[in-house]
Image (tube, helix red, strand yellow):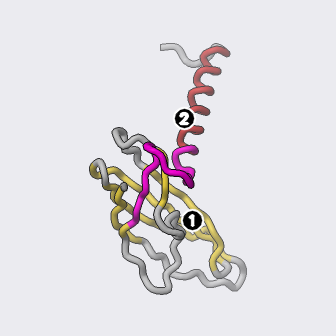
Amino acid sequence: MQALTTPLARSFALGGLLLALGVGAAVLKPTSCCDKSTHKLVLHAPVEADAFYLTAWSDGPLHLKFDLDEMPGFEITSEAWYYGCKWRGVETLVPIDTRTYSYDYRETLLGCRAGATPTRKTPRQGYVTVE
């Protein structure tokens, strides 16, 4: 099999990559309108009192566009400063069945300003229902 050495082959490969990245970005964009391809995702996970979560569900359920027949997995990443420290939160959704995802939340401390003390990590697991 030949490597992608011709300009035409490289163009097709780059175009396919850009198309795939564009589709992924559109899928994770919350929508304000509901149609037959927009689904409400409701998080069911424990919440510790006084805990800090970098979650896409901070304002309630998400509304995402996707095909229920293909139930894609999602990885949602957020970053924020909290009490002088920068954190990254990663929420991973893996399909279980046609109406349920497993949910995993993890945080990574990216760094702190001088004198800041990081809070403790608050990982959690649960599930997400599709309505």
Instruction: Look at 59% across and 69% down and name the residue there.
Output: 87
Q: Specify the amino acid type for callout 1.
A: Arg
Q: Percent position (x, y) of residue 7? A: 67, 15
Whether residue 124 is visible here, answered yes or no, is yes
Determine if the magenta segment contains residue 30.
yes
Instruction: Look at 64% across and 14% down and name the residue there.
Output: 8
Q: How many marks?
A: 2
Locate the C terminus and report the quarter of the image it occupies: bottom left
In this view of the protein, which residue sits in the foreground, 66 or 47? 66
Whether residue 111 is visible here, answered yes or no, is no
Q: Percent position (x, y) of residue 16? A: 57, 27
Residue 122 location, quadrant: bottom left
- The residues colored magenta run 26-43
* Label 1 SS: strand
Q: Which residue is mark 2?
A: 20
In this view of the protein, which residue sits in the foreground, 86 or 97? 97
Label 1 packing within 10 angstroms: few (<14), some (14-19), many (20+):
some
Determine if the magenta segment contains residue 119.
no
Q: Relative to 96, is 113 above or below?
A: below
The answer for how far apart the CA atoms under marks 2 and 1 are is 24 Å
Which mark, by number, is residue 88? Answer: 1
Which is in the foreground here, disc 2 or disc 1? 2
Instruction: Look at 66% across and 83% down and name the residue there.
Output: 116
Q: Specify the amino acid type for callout 2.
A: Ala
Q: Relative to 82, is 18 above or below?
A: above
